Amino acid sequence: MKDACDVCVIGSGAGGGPVAFTLAKAGYKVIVLEKGPWLTEQDFYKDELACCRRRVYVPDLKEEPHVVEIEEETGGWVARSTGGSGWDFWNGNCVGGSTNFMSGFFYRLKPVDFRLLSTFGPIEDAHIVDWPISYEDLEPYYTLVEREVGVSGKVVLHPHNEPRSTPDFPYPPTQEHPITEDMDKACRTLGFNVFPTPRAILPFAAMGRKGCAYSGYCGSYGCATGAKGSSRVALINRAVATGHCEVLPKAMVYRLETGGDGKVISAHYFGEQGTSKTIRARIFVVACQAIETARLLLLSKGPKHPNGLGNSSNLVGRNLLFAGGGAGFGWVSFAKFGEQLREDTFINRTLQDWYVIRDPNFGQPQKGGTVSFSFEHPAPIARATQLLEDRDKKLVWGHVLKRKLERRFRGGRFIKLEAFCDWLPIDNCLVTLDKTIKDKWHLPVAKIRVAFHPKNLQVGWYLASHGAEVLKQMGAEDVIAYAVGSPPTNLVAGTCRFGKDPKTSVLDPDCRAHEVENLFVTDGSFMPTGGSAPYTWTIYANAFRVADRIKAQLS
Amino acid sequence: MDRRQFLVRMGATSLAFIPTYSFLSTFPSKIVPFKKGSLLSSKQLALLETLTEHFFPTEPDAPGAREINATGYLAWVIEDPKLDVSVRTFLVEGFTQLEHVSRQKTQKEFSQLSYDEQESVLRILEDTPFGHRWLKTVLDFVMEALLSDPIYGGNTGGAGWKWLHHTPPFPSPPQNKRYFLL
């Protein structure tokens, strides 16, 4: 039957790809329902209008908005639709999801991330918990991702190395820019332990994919060579090749129907022509990214699930996570660093010396995070439009604008630092269904209340200021660093945290809904805390782990 | 009629109405920016040309609005069926506002003003919330004309990239993979 299968996977990104690949390879019939179209390398060009100015890889916000609720200075909450507000929480609607458009900076979490509460104790107003699994449970799957998705890097010992079951990465680092030597030297002088940032990018052709072309346009752009380890190219294509997996693009799932026993019996979706269709399966896996996963569960009420699927705890949508932290820049001029600075290879450098901060001036030992360095994205229109207003917000045009453009483009480049710390889970960061705004299918849209814990800023600033020391030491000019309270909308997790207690978690340790034995969630929704680094690798690894549990349940 | 058919039809029916503006000659095939009855009148097009040349003047060693076909590019943006209707309305309304301020302050059309008079009028317009937002939006699109892929009609021959020593991004989109066809 074309409308029935063993496993129905909703979403084809980092959470869906490993499940589809693992189960199809094991011979189970898998159907993947993907909301977006099926684009391939032949559709991806370095086209700033496509990716970023007209945003063709995400839904039209007039048709599919979210509602964002933020706190006013006076203390009340104000909600606005993203259709015109400047916010956009969509990250890539197409086969492979947002992994098509990631930068591919890949980090494992560390053992301490799995036991934050027991290591550091509670934090006031933050719902810190230990994970129900340990780093050791996930380690084999991190290693599996290195091999199956393709992660390049080089193990360099430093005080916070996570344990590994293999001596090194399966692929050597991508080509490094000459300025990394200046950065390494600066770090040595400062006593910092810098190491090459692992990337989900193949440095050379492998696994039927081409190697990196070093155009420098990774983040926000689809990869034209297939070197970037998107779920589509690394896993979905291979799942389909088994003959056991079918991908249905432009299939927008709007409800999971449950039977009298509370189990899911079918997924209802709108096809390309807008007609409603149904897939029946033994097991359902939801992986739509944390916000849309929560929305789908809340939309899927049934006789046994009056508050939404798997939501007897009323925790679906709660404890929404992003990535906390800070950022900074330093200017390196061609006059000072030479014309070789124009080369389009990567910096790829990371510091994790403060993954746990043991600094008496900063209080008790506490969780810190990661500082990564890269060149500013080369997208030229984005860089140019930053120059259109002066410090007083007066518009700049004419000869003045042209001289600014010349200095900006012909004078040098910015090195960017990003600091990542835990985005602490709090009461006022959550997803619910909006009561008034509906999307083009007349379904309530997700309302995202966004607030952050002040500790995010403190730790973010601590990390960013250390990163700025490196930029200054290596001779960069106009160095600035700052903490960031706004959520980075491309790193989203939480909303269906896993745990052992059904009263305090949505999913069990295998990421199965506590109260729905044939429903799994495998995107970043499961994470009760986010770790202090971008977590795409962790989502991939956990989805492989859960796929093994599903395989066991099916057999 | 789908989007592709619409664009093809635009190209097929509008050639007879192309006025003498030079920017049209470098427009990508099958995307002719406007036709009779389009949103922009000849006067508005002339105003747009004056404005873009004020914003991005031609210099001996640097391309200006003419060299990057900024006017043609903006005319096409306004005609782009993918452009949000409210943005299109906003852009067109700005021409009326600019002309209104120009006549109010100088009793002349904007295109007839000296450089200094134009500057003065634009700064007056900028002081209003609408004016600031509109001028910023036009400038944004001039930057697109300067640095987007030449296949979209601006950045003629990669003039913007060459001037700013920007390595042309690769691979660049072919005709059948322009963003509105994806």
Image (cartoon, rainbow, N blue to C red):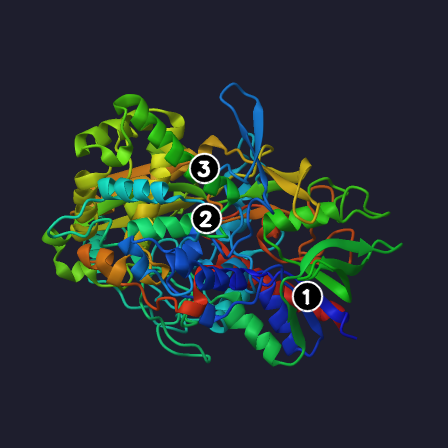
Is disc 3 placed on a helix, strand or loop?
helix
Is disc 2 placed on a helix, strand or loop?
loop
Is disc 1 placed on a helix, strand or loop?
helix
Residue type, label 2: Ser
- Labels 1 & 3 near each other (Cβ < 8 A): no
Residue drawn 59% across the image and 53% down it: A289
**Circles 1 and 3 on the same chain:** no
Q: CA distance from mark 1 to mark 2?
A: 60 Å
User: Disc 2 designates what residue?
Assistant: B38
Mark in the foreground, 1 or 3 = 3
Mark in the foreground, 1 or 2 = 2
Mark in the foreground, 3 or 2 = 2
Identify whether A67 is placed above or below A525: above
Identify whether A269 is placed above or below B64: below
Give the number of the disc on residue B90: 3
Give the number of the disc on residue A400: none
Q: Nearer the viewer, residue A114 or A392?
A: A392
Residue drawn 45% across the image and 33% down it: A455
Left or right of B143: which side holds A506?
Answer: right
Q: Chain of mark 1?
A: A
State the residue lying farthest toward the right: A260
Q: CA distance from mark 1 to mark 3?
A: 55 Å
**Circles 3 and 2 on the same chain:** yes
**Residue A105 rendering spot, x and y as whole percentages:** 40, 58
Q: Give the mark nearer the N terminus: 3 vs 2.
A: 2
Q: Residues within 10 Å of mark 1 (few under 14, many from 20)?
A: some
Q: CA distance from mark 3 to mark 2?
A: 15 Å
Residue type, label 3: Phe
Left or right of A302: which side holds B63?
Answer: left
Q: Chain of mark 2?
A: B
User: Disc 1 designates what residue?
Assistant: A549
Q: Chain of mark 3?
A: B
